[in-house]
Amino acid sequence: MITRRRFMNRTIAAGSVLGFPAIIPSSVLGADAPSNTIQVGQIGFGRIAKSMDVPGIIKCQGVRVVAVSDLDRGRLETGRKFIDESYARKKQPGAVRTHADYREIIARDDIDAVSISTPDHWHSQPAVEAAFAGKDVYMQKPASLTISEGRFFSDALTLNKRIFLLGSQQRSTEQFHRACELVRNGAIGKIKHIEIGLPGDPAGGRTEEMPVPEGLDYKMWLGSTPEVYYTEDRVHNRKGIIGRPGWLRCEQFGAGMITGWGSHHLDIAHWAMNWESIGPQFIEGKGEFHTKGLWDVHGDYDITLTYPCGTTMRVWNKFPNGVRFIGENGAWIFVSRGAAKMTASDPVAPGRPLKALDASQPDILKFEIPSNGVRLYHHRGVHHQNWIDCIRSRKESLVPAETAHRSCTACLLAHIGMKLGHKLEWDHKTERFVKDDKANAMLARSERAPYGTRRAFERLSGKK
């Protein structure tokens, strides 16, 4: 694992180009802080951080959020106030420190771990940098913007032996755990087919150029993606941390709902089927992409992924929002969030609420796992507590880095299938398409200097 001294030297060297202040805490070259409280730095304070990640971490035992960063000064101040007031209500006074640049949080020797709740294009780079700085990492899904980024991200966490947990909260929800154990233990026999329903995104978004708001470091916010003019619907709402931000609907910063919700449901399918270290072999389907307005992610889509065992997975926006496992004799198990929402802006299925757990026959749900059956990792309650517990025990979390990378990869393969519209063959061992140069060219994106996950990994690992 890279030492803090080496990390700081390399970060400072990069900072001389980026304008990052080379401030080294006096304790940075000493031993780890002896405090029994795990100290967390929050990177990014938007809709998900405010509604889920920060409240989730604050609820955990033996942890304290001591720092927050954001490239938007208004959101940074909102984060500071929110965290301070949350602790004041718990009668735990103390002031959280603010940082305009997240790298200052990573450089702090008194911080043990970071929570990353940034836009998708800013997920993997800070995760890589945090791993090489010896920090454990919680990160919102999806794991990466591209499959290439995901490989660097997973390798960095593994190489540095860091505890990682992805924000796949469904694994900490009882009905998803139960559904996956039923499938894994043969409650409906061999699985022949899986149906996954995900929402889509609308067209729209204002295209007029606007002045960059005071207090927003827009050039850094763009990160490794191309430099384009500012308009509010490309970034986030200026009136507060409300609603779904515009960047979610721009391909420059993400792939749309196929990774936004797909990372949840495909992860559940992988968990149930014991596919966490592999991926599909064939990808075939189509997708429609918006051409009017600013937002250009996919609308309607219909993709089928075929796994090496022959089981097919159809991902279609016309299916109910959830995961249906279908056995060889037609019996099925369906699992969803029901009427529950993780955040206030989560989409829900039209009509009457879906059942959280359902089956073709009621007795299927009463199936008893045999004494020698498969028992899946079980964690109940606040998802973030699993991260904190694993930081203490140094045991693998519910959703470690490689698992996160593989489920994100399946989503991104579906996205590439939508874009190209012809049948693709994927080798999960080499992480390359078979005899398809056009598809392989889509595994990575060019990175706008001086940002990028690849640059961060190569700089900090010394490997190219």
Image (cartoon, rainbow, N blue to C red):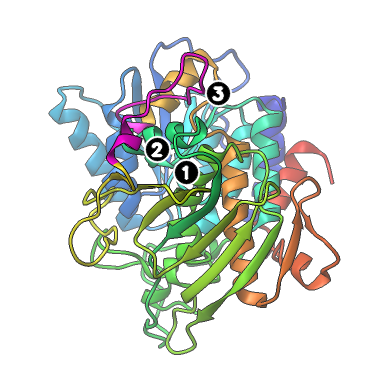
SS for dot 1: helix
Tell me the element at label 2.
Answer: helix
User: In the displayed image of the protein, which residue is found farthest to the front?
Assistant: 329
Q: Earlier in the sequence, mark 2 or mark 3?
A: 2
Q: Reply above or below: 65 against 193.
A: above
Label 2: how many Cα within 10 Å (few below 14, some 14–19, many 20+): many
Identify the image quadrant of residue 92: top left
Does residue 17 belong to the magenta stretch? no
The mark nearer the N terminus, 2 or 1, is 2
Direction from residue 371 to residue 304 in the image, left or right: right
Q: Quadrant of residue 131?
A: top right
Asked if residue 16 shows in the view, the reply is: no
- Image marks 2 and 3: residues in contact by CB distance under 8 Å: no
* Residue at 75% in and 57% down: 426
Q: Secondary structure at mark 3?
A: loop
The residue at the point 68 percent across, 33 percent down is: 7
Judge depth for marks 2 and 1 and give the one in front.
Answer: 2
CB within 8 Å, label 2 to label 1: yes
Whole-angstrom CA distance, mark 2 to mark 1, is 9 Å
Q: Amino acid at mark 2?
A: Ala
State the residue at coordinates (68%, 43%).
278
Whichever of labels 1 and 3 marks the residue nearer the N terminus, that label is 1
Nearer-the-camera pick, 219 or 130 = 130
The disc at residue 268 is 1
Gap in Å between the C-alphas at discs 2 and 3? 22 Å
In percent of width and height, residue 37 lies at: 38, 16
Mark 3, Cα crowd under 10 Å, few <14 / some 14-19 / many 20+, is some
Rendered location of residue 428, percent (x, y): 74, 48
For mark 3, what is the residue? 396
What secondary structure do most residues of the magenta stretch adopt? loop
Residue 322 relative to residue 316: left or right: left
Q: Which mark is residue 179?
A: 2
